[in-house]
Image (cartoon, grey):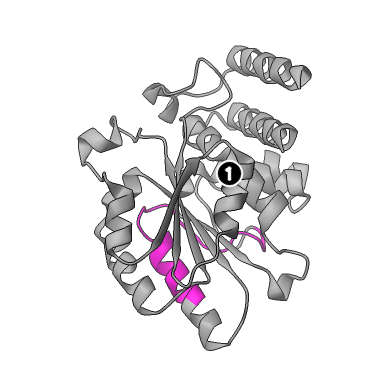
Amino acid sequence: MKQIATNIRKNILHIANLAGSPHVGSALSCTDILATLYFEILNLEEYENRDYFILSKAHSAMALYATLYEKGLLSKEEMEGYYQNGGTLPAHTDRLTNPYIEISAGSLGHGLPISLGVAHALKLKSSDRQVYVLMGDGESQEGSVWEAAMLAPHLKLDNLTVFIDRNNLQGYGRADEILSYEPIDKKFEAFNWKVLRVDGHDSQAIKEAVEVQSDKPKMIICDTTKGKGVSFMEDELIWHYFVVTDEIKKKAFAELEEVSSEK
């Protein structure tokens, strides 16, 4: 899993460099969550009966594209067409670009409500398919998140699992200083969710949290580091916006390859 996550991080840096796009830190932050989901958890073998994954923090679309490529669900040509004029993939997700991109997203706070609709529909059909959604921590400042948080337990959506990528950095600073959401675990517990908190870079811990049985919707708070995997990007707000030049890509790849060779 560590090698898969390293490969995904390289993919992210590669397409960020080609496109000159921002949001690299946000994508690297959630890489281990996506790697674990796509290679250990999601049932994708039969498309019509697949589990759903919804990326609500869609400014991290590079992480999803890079993971889909690593999983063999997106071609290299499609991945490298990210954020290009006349290209294949937009900066934020568009559901018409690939069968495994479930929603068009960008404006924060929408992924969780949409996921509730999907999970409720599956319940009405007596389906055992699961719905997973990834949110940002700054995103939890949106009112729509808390409306959905009230409704999910009321609808008994035990087929819904939500991940919060808690890197505590959003566009203009520390998320808990801009509008504090803590104690976010206690808040979701008060709304009658099953809440677990894990190291968001520990694949085994993420998998074990998903496997915990519950008759409630589940919230997994993943403590993460923005820019994870590249030391000079880690926990640095500037990597919400800075672009990956050729020199930066070379330096970042060298770090990732060194760590990979040590395993």
Q: Is residue 112 above or below residue 165?
A: below
Question: Residue 2's spot in the image, x, y percent?
Answer: 70, 33
Q: Quadrant of the N terminus?
A: top right
Is disc 1 placed on a helix, strand or loop? helix
- Magenta stretch, residue numbers: 98-119
Q: Is residue 137 above or below residue 23?
A: below
Residue under the image location 73 percent in, 50 percent down? 74
Identity, as a three-letter code, of the amino acid under mark 1: Ala
- Residue 64 appears anywhere in the view: no
Q: Disc 1 designates what residue?
A: 205
Q: Residue at x 35, y 34 (%)?
A: 168
Q: Would residue 82 be found to the left or right of residue 2 on screen?
A: left
Q: Is residue 14 above or below residue 215?
A: above
Image position of 19 with respect to 104: above or below: above
- Quadrant where the C terminus sits is top right
- Residue at the far bottom: name it: 125
Q: Is residue 171 left or right of residue 15?
A: left
Q: Residue 119 in the image: x percent, y percent?
A: 50, 74
Residue 82 position in % (x across, y down): 62, 42
Is residue 117 inside the magenta stretch?
yes
Residue 112 located within the stretch drawn in magenta? yes
How crowded pointer 1 is (Cα within 10 Å; few <14, some 14-19, many 20+) is rated as: some
Question: Which residue is at 44% across, 67% downward?
Answer: 217
Q: Residue furthest front?
A: 213
Q: Nearer the viewer, residue 122 or 243?
A: 122
Q: Residue 53 or 190: which is nearer the viewer? A: 190
Point 78% across, 18% down: residue: 261
Q: Position of residue 36 (x, y in %)?
A: 65, 47
When asked about the image quadrant of residue 84, the answer is: top right
The mark tally for this picture is 1
Q: Could one spot residue 261 in this view of the protein?
A: yes
